[in-house]
Amino acid sequence: MSDPTNPQWDLLPNDPEGFFNLSGEYDLKDLKRKYNSFIRQFKPEKFPDEFQKIRAAFEYLNDALRYQENPKSKPLKPELNFDWDSVNQAENKDHLQNEGPAAPTPLSDALDPDKLNLTHPIESLPVSSKTLHLHERVNDESSMNLYQELQEKVLKTPYDYYALAVFSDLLQDGDHSFYYWLLEGLKIHEEEPALFELLRQFFKSFQESKKLVKLLEATSQVVRSDRFYYLTESAWDHLIRDLPFDTFKNLLETCEQNLIDHEVDHRMVFYIHILKPAIWKADNKWIDEMFCRIEDHYDRMSFWLEEEFEFLYLVKIYQEQRVNFLRYDPTRVIVDLAISEYCTQNEQDADRCFLEYQHEIISLDEELQFDLSDSEESLEIVKILWEKIADDVFARIDPDIPEKDASLEQQSQQLAVRLLTEGLGPRYKLADDITSFIIGAIVLGTSGLSLFFLTGIVDSFVFASVKIGVLLLVSLITLYYTANIMGRFAFKYYQSWWRFEIMRFYQSDWFPLIDLADELEKIESIKYSKEKYSGLDKIAMLMRDDLGLFFYVTAQRLLNVCQ
């Protein structure tokens, strides 16, 4: 059985499901869970070749599941990964025609019909020697003659079109190309699985933007069903990052006008996928239009599409509030860059950049402060977005660190002692005791004077009531300002001592910030050296409102597992 500690590499690329140990019914969450467990063991910086194999297998199944394609149809074998660059770098065509391409995969193997997954029958070329197939003849005959012979065939099989594609690149045919012959084959053999998959692989690797614009429009005139989105998604991923948005938008509209079916499932998957980077480049009108199109068919969404759409909705809200969010301090620029680059780059680069920004956040240390004067809504959106992104990245890098013996309750007790009894903790206790004394004196004084006014003989009852009312009002105002001053004292101590200790705690231990705050609030007070210390409820409240501390804690979590 294939598992992260003992992967069966021989199952790739033909059996990605077996490699990930997936069988029966499984969904995207199951696939991602398996994929993450493998790449934790084979990280790209240490095992680049192994990572690429795992990534290619994941992408194949991921794309099939997202677009509701059949993942059971196995991808093409590695022998079909012809080294076109090696062919183009050869010295001359005559050498290629006589000797064949100097490539890792021999041309005879690349043309072997047994290594293709074609649904239509494969025929030999109509030549005198009927017993020899094309892949057998290529070693002894001129590539140019075979290419011309294939072109002259009236009824061409899918394999013929594949062979023409190979020869066109081999012979550097200026009028035809690998892509051209695959598309010609799909005109005759509509959506033939092997030709379709070869074309999809072509779009995954081809990144010349100017040519892609023409190729996508030509493809939309041949593949006119909603499978066009599944076929060309990789090309659109490249163009959304490389082209001006107006050019991208116009091309997409042109291609969609050529599609003639009325299915929406593939289109919804594509829109949700492409909106993630497009939100950062597109105009608001286009973004709103795409969201409306998706919302019109919300009831058709699977659970994972709903999750993706909810994430996009948060990104859209943040994008609308982004100008106000960036207005206050340079720290927010780091947060903004991390969010935008996560959304606009491919997964591997996005993870790497996000982790690099965690280093910048950690380096800010006590400077990592957030002014809460702007709207709470924008800060809450940023917090939710950051948490979702961090959880996504964490799932791919978590090396399954064993849990420590110490529980949250035990760690919280130890932290509470340090917060209240060390450093500035005793000073806060003194300030808190003085404040409590003042509040007690005010309450007792108010009660005593009120009783005196009520029992006094000199004043009438009405006049005594007025005095009591004024006394209560003054007492309430005094209590309010006393509590306000104490709140400022607590915030001052939090900034100068408690926050630093909490950061130090997270350098060696990690629990969710909210859970730690809740636990400290439950403790309320501690006894130490026969003295009673309180104030943990105030610390917990300040922790929950401290967005800078939230970013610091998240960064420590990610960087600790990376180490």
Image: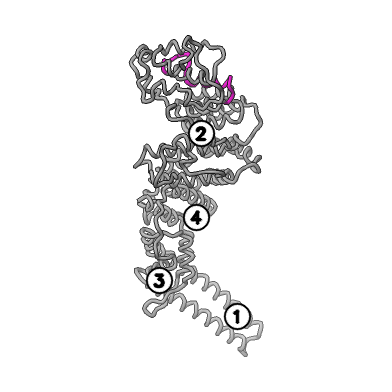
Residue 320 in sight from this viewpoint? no
Query: Relative to residue 403, is residue 328 depicted above or below?
Result: above
- Which x, y percent locates residue 152? 52, 10
**Start and end of the magenta stretch?**
170-191
Q: Tag 4: residue type? A: Ser
Q: Residues within 10 Å of mark 4 (few under 14, many from 20)?
A: few
- Which x, y percent locates residue 535? 45, 70
* Mark 2–mark 1 distance (CA, rounded to whole Å): 87 Å
Q: Tag 1: residue type? A: Ile
Which comes before the other along the chain, label 4 or label 1?
4
Q: Secondary structure at mark 2?
A: loop
Tell me the residue that label 3 is attached to: 428
Q: Residues within 10 Å of mark 1 (few under 14, many from 20)?
A: many
Q: Classify the position of the N terminus by image quarter.
A: top left
Q: Give the image's coloring scheme.
A: one colour
Which comes before the other along the chain, label 2 or label 3?
2
Tell me how many marks there are.
4
* Mark 4–mark 2 distance (CA, rounded to whole Å): 56 Å
Tell me the residue that label 1 is attached to: 468
> On the rendered structure, is 166 left or right of 120?
left
Tell me the residue that label 2 is attached to: 74
- Between 142 and 541, the one lying in front of the other is 142
* Mark 2–mark 3 distance (CA, rounded to whole Å): 68 Å
Which comes before the other along the chain, label 3 or label 1?
3
Viewer-side label of 4, 3: 3
Q: In the image, which disc is placed on residue 373? A: 4
